[in-house]
Image (cartoon, rainbow, N blue to C red):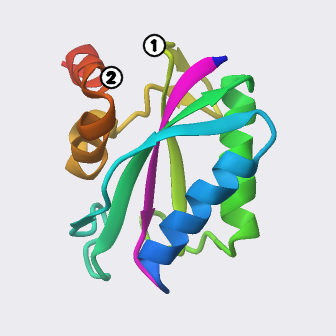
């Protein structure tokens, strides 16, 4: 089993309930087990700022899925929860980003690890530091 770290966020509907639902769906997904989750924090929108504040959190998962398969599992859960991608950085019912997978570094057309913008986003780093400070520090050092 590999360890991976996810960033979750929502800012429309009932964000706290949607985050809890996403965690439950991740834990129920074949090959994924949620082993830690951070507290939920409220943050201002990043990128496109004319929208409601976000509820954000991080989760650690143990998985036997390969990184691209874990990404697809996250996208499946988003879709099953009703996420429709209208605009980049726009409002969303749920967002589940694969931030890191072990300490793997990769850059493909479909997946970059660690997440390309994680080191710039406090809404990723603050919850991640709560459950995996060594991974948050590794992400920041690697980008530096």
Q: Which residues are magenta?
A: 2-12
Residue 107 or 23: which is nearer the viewer? 23
Callout 2: SS = helix
Q: Which residue is mark 1?
A: 103
In the picture, the quarter occupied by the C terminus is top left
Q: Residue at x 50, y 16 (%)?
A: 102
**What's the distance in space between the residues labelled 2 and 1, CA to CA?**
8 Å
Left or right: 90 as drawn, with respect to 108: left
Residue furthest right in the image: 30
Q: Residue at x 25, y 27 (%)?
A: 133
Residue 76 or 48: which is nearer the viewer? 76
Left or right: 44 as drawn, with respect to 47: left
Q: Which residue is mark 2?
A: 135
Q: Is residue 41 visible?
A: yes
| Residue 95 at x, y percent in the picture | 52, 60
Q: Residue at x 42, y 62 (%)?
A: 9
Q: Which of the 4 image quarters holds residue 72?
A: top right
Q: Is residue 91 visible?
A: no
Label located before the other in sequence (2 or 1): 1
The answer to whether 110 is drawn above or below residue 45 in the figure is: above
In the picture, the quarter occupied by the N terminus is top right
Q: Residue at x 74, y 26 (%)?
A: 65
| Residue 30 at x, y percent in the picture | 81, 40
């Amino acid at each position: 089993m590999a360890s991976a770290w996810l960033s979750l966020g929502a800012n429309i509907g009932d964000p706290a309930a949607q985050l809890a639902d996403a965690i439950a769906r991740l834990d129920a997904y074949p090959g994924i087990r949620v082993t830690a989750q951070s507290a939920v924090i409220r943050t201002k929108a990043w990128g496109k700022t004319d929208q409601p504040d976000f509820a954000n959190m991080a989760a650690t998962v143990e998985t036997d899925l390969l990184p691209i398969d874990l990404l697809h599992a996250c996208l499946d859960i988003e879709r099953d929860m009703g996420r429709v991608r209208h605009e980049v950085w726009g409002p969303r019912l749920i967002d589940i980003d694969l931030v890191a997978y072990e300490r793997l570094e990769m850059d493909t057309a479909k997946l970059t690890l660690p997440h390309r913008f994680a080191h710039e986003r406090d809404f990723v780093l603050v919850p991640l530091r709560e459950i995996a400070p060594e991974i948050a520090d590794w992400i920041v050092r690697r980008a530096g």
